[in-house]
Each structure stands twice: as structure tokens, then as C-alpha cells.
Image: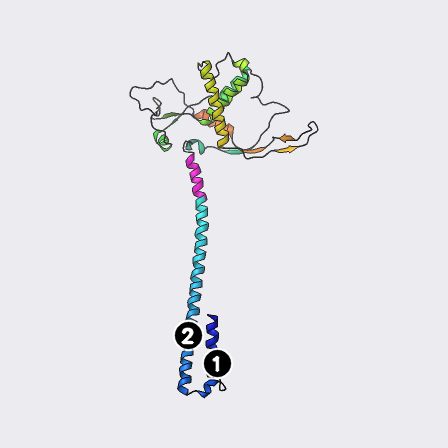
Amino acid sequence: MAAKYTKIHEVGDHCASPCSSCATLSNDRCSDLEDVSMKLEGQILDDRHSWRRKSLRTGLQAIVLIVLSVASFFAGRSLHRVDENACLDTAWDEVRKDVRFKRTEFNPRFVGPKSPYMGPPTPAKDKLWYDLAALRNFGVDKPTLQAMNRSKGAVEFPGLGGRFQVGMEAFHQLHCLNYVRMYTYQDHYGTVDYDMIAEGPKERQEHKDHCVEVLRQRLMCNPDLNVYSYHWTQKNKVPFGNLYTSHQCVDWDRFYAWAEKNAVSSPPLTKPEGAEVWS
């Protein structure tokens, strides 16, 4: 386009100059050349304007595309969060709305005072663990179970106005941890019923395997991404792992108080005749 414009500009200059070769041409011929020059220059101007309009349009399209891309990125992140929440389809909203978090320092208890949950069995320690890990029951309505895709064959509490029996994984997992703890002191607990239910040797081993598997799945489902560092110490000739780490944790005392307040006493239940079954 630039080369064309330069050439036409030279033709126009020849016709405008009294010393140009146009002076040797007839007036009509020079006039014709001037007309051609003006038309071509007008076409060039139109082409320039068209190019500018196209450039402006292309620029606007690029801006719109960038805006849409950014919007799609954040929308995707938002949808990803929604999908993550959707995966938690059995989390009870009644609990989630009451949960609070707080910073908590983990203490590995290698040295210094032990946690009250640590150490050899005692009646006081057994009670502490039982209170912590007892399998509590709660009552939810049918729409809640339907939203969780768990209404088929669900067990209804008698006399509770259409409330259905549910447990909570937190206490199930603590129950399993307590079961494994008892196994580490099997000389003591060998003559004690681990779970307040009658179990033979085969059932007890299956129960232990189940509990280890539950805890494995739980830990791998939500792996702890906090890091701990290694240090030189006076007592150790090899690097020592500093397991004192800070975590964002559920306020356990608040959650436990909620669970104690909302737990439902569960009488022994027997499947009624003709009841819908889950499997």
C-alpha cells in the first residue's frame, strides 16, 4: 500500500509543476491525469480509513476476548470450588454453618509432659477416649438425605417426627483410632471388649483391618501439606525433625459441644416387615 501511494504522489507532483513533463501535454490530458490521481488518492484515503476501522474493530475484539478469557478463568475457579463442595455431598449443612476455625500448634510430645490421651491404659484414660470417640447418632429430615443421595432404605427414628438416623465420620474415625490404640496394648485389652459389642477373634481382626483402612483413606483424602524442618541439636548427631507445626483447625471444643447437644439417643432398632432396603 505504501508503494502505491508513493507512485501516485509523484504523478500528482508532475501535473502541479510548471517544469514537469505534464507541461508538454494537452490541457485535457493533464486534466485526465489529475482526475485519475485524485480518484486514486481518494481510494487510498478510503483504504486507510477502512484499515483504521478494521484495526479498531480487531483491537476491540481482542479486548473483548481478553475480558472473556479472564472471566472464564475466574468462573472456572468458582465452578471448581462448587464441584469440590459437591463432592462433599454427605457433609451436613447443619454442622458446617456452626463450624469455626482457629490456629492450633501441634505438639509431637516426644519430650516433656504427655498428652492425657497418651500412655498405658487406666480407667480414667479409657473414659477419656470413650467420651471422645463414642459413636453418636443424629437425626436429619428426609430432604437432607435425598440431597445426599442417601434416602433409599434409610432408618427412621420412631417418634421423632420423620427424622432419620445418621452418624458422623469424625466420631467414626476417632472410634477407629481408639480401636487401634487398644490394639497397641493388647495384653491389657485382650480380655476387654474393644467396642462394647461381642466379637470373636475373626471379627476382631476384621474390625482392626477396617479401622486401619478407614484411617488410611482419611489421611490420603486430605493430606497435611504443612512442612516440618530438620535441625541440629545438642543431643542428636543426626538431623532432628521439628514436628512443632502450626495448623488451621476446626475449633474442636465448639464442635464437640454442638455434637453433644444434638446427639439423639438410639434405642435398639429392628428392621420392620417390608422395609425398603439399601442393598
- Measured in 3D between alpha carbons, the distance from the residue under mark 1 to the one under mark 2, in whole angstroms, is 16 Å
Front in this rendered view, residue 194 or 240: 240
Q: Quick check: is 80 in the magenta stretch?
A: yes
Q: Earlier in the sequence, mark 1 or mark 2?
A: 1
**Residue at label 1?**
13
Please say whether residue 96 is visible from this viewpoint. yes
User: Element type at marker 2?
Assistant: helix
Q: Could you tell me residue 107's position as x and y percent?
A: 59, 28
Q: Amino acid at mark 2?
A: Gly
Q: Report the side of 44 relative to 248 (left or right).
A: left
Q: Quadrant of the C terminus?
A: top left
Residue 71, placed above or below residue 91: below
The quadrant in which residue 268 appears is top left
Which label sits in the foreground, 1 or 2? 1
Magenta part of the chain: 77-87
User: Element type at marker 1?
Assistant: helix
Q: Could you tell me residue 60's position as x and y percent?
A: 44, 59
The quadrant in which residue 162 appears is top left
Q: Amino acid at mark 1?
A: Asp
Residue at the extreme right of the image, as rendered: 234
Say which residue appears at 36% left-offset and 25% top-offset: 164
Say which residue appears at 47% left-offset and 16% top-offset: 204
Front in this rendered view, residue 51 or 10: 10
**Residue at label 2?**
42
Q: Could you tell me residue 79's position as x and y percent?
A: 43, 42
Please say whether residue 196 is visible from this viewpoint. no
Q: Report the side of 247 relative to 202 (left or right).
A: right
Say which residue appears at 48% left-offset and 23% top-offset: 211
Q: Report the side of 277 relative to 175 (left or right).
A: left
Q: Quick check: is 92 in the magenta stretch?
A: no
